[in-house]
Amino acid sequence: MGALLGLDTGREELLPARCLVGRSRACDLILAARDVSSQHAVVQWTGAVWELQDLGSRNGTSVGEHRLAFGERVPLRRGLQLRFGRQSGAFEFVDDSAPRPMAIHLDSGRIRVADGGLLALPDEDAPELVLYPEMPDRWMGERPGEISEVGDRAVVLVRGEMWRVHLPTGGSGTWEESQAGLVVADLQLRFSHSSDEEYVELVAIAEGRRIDLQARAHHYPLLLLARARLADRQRGVPGPEQGWVHQDRLLTMLKIEPGHLNISIHRSRGQLGQHGVLDAAKLVERRKGTRQLRLGVEQIEIVRV
């Protein structure tokens, strides 16, 4: 993803899709030099390239030897040096790839970047909040048992700590489903389990490709959801209503807590995302306001080994 390297500090600054630069605490890249304006400039992704725009700063914004006029936009390429005012150190533009979803911890400045299209907070090992795109201009935040829409630059509370999230939208040309690749709707899931169900192996098949997800403990909740979907299909339940299970019922069947279920679902989605499935969050769907969830794949096979 896009990044600036501070030539004085040696620190790399990752860029959200729209990075406001200045002295104000509302900025994304905060510079302390006195000749930097409160909102000095903006570095933003156009959907094709990064560009720099001066916002009417008193002491100017420069790219190399060129000082930008008020409102002037300049496309950036790797290796260019940027300077905001005269007293602040220079930056080098070192990465011109598209932005990725990210979150910044408001107290420490720690950054979390999405992996496989999923942004997990506070970390991958024990996520309390997972953010994913539902459509080009809409992001959803999922906590144990509930989902809600989350906007770009929203501040979210996770375990008593505040994070600002930066969520690229279709307008910035970064929504992953616009790219060619596998999606959950293309998949067929093949579960293989032992008689005591201590061992559950999962393979995903799509477009002639076989994705071996191996045997993992987090496949077991998926197996239960797959059975619920198949059972409803055999009873003639209409497709949109097939497979929905109340979370409390699933937790009772699994004998686990909501947080443990959330971790298992995140790990299952993460495996698919790492194999290039663009909308891996749809592996498990949640019905808003009902605490119901279901397996998001229609083509299912279950065999006993």
Image (cartoon, rainbow, N blue to C red):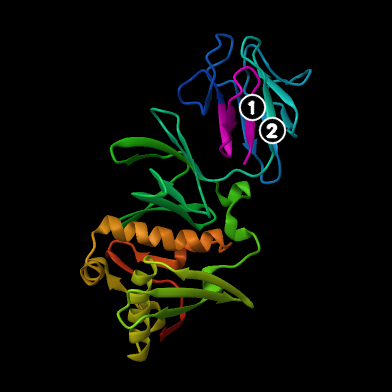
Across and down, in percent, residue 119 comes to 46, 49
Q: Earlier in the sequence, mark 1 or mark 2?
A: 1
Q: Gap in Å between the C-alphas at discs 1 and 2? A: 6 Å
Instruction: Tell me if 95 is positioned left or right of 197 in this view.
Output: right
- Disc 2 element: strand
Give the residue number, with chain letter if any, for mark 1.
Answer: 5
Which range is magenta? 1-20
Q: Nearer the viewer, residue 65 or 189?
A: 189
Quarter of the rendering containing residue 255: bottom left
Task: Kindly identify the amino acid type of the residue bearing the numbered disc 1.
Answer: Leu
Q: Is residue 294 visible to the viewer in this orientation of the structure?
A: no
Instruction: Tell me if 159 is positioned left or right of 153 in this view.
Output: left
Disc assigned to residue 94: 2
Residue at 33% from the left image edge and 85% from the top image edge: 232
Residue at 58% from the left image edge and 14% from the top image edge: 36
Question: Quick check: is 120 in the magenta stretch?
Answer: no
Disc assigned to residue 98: none
Task: Kindly identify the amino acid type of the residue bearing the numbered disc 2.
Answer: Val
- Disc 1 element: strand
Instruction: Tell me if 210 is positioned left or right of 82 in this view.
Output: left
Callouts 1 and 2 close, C-beta under 8 Å: yes
Across and down, in percent, residue 257 comes to 23, 59
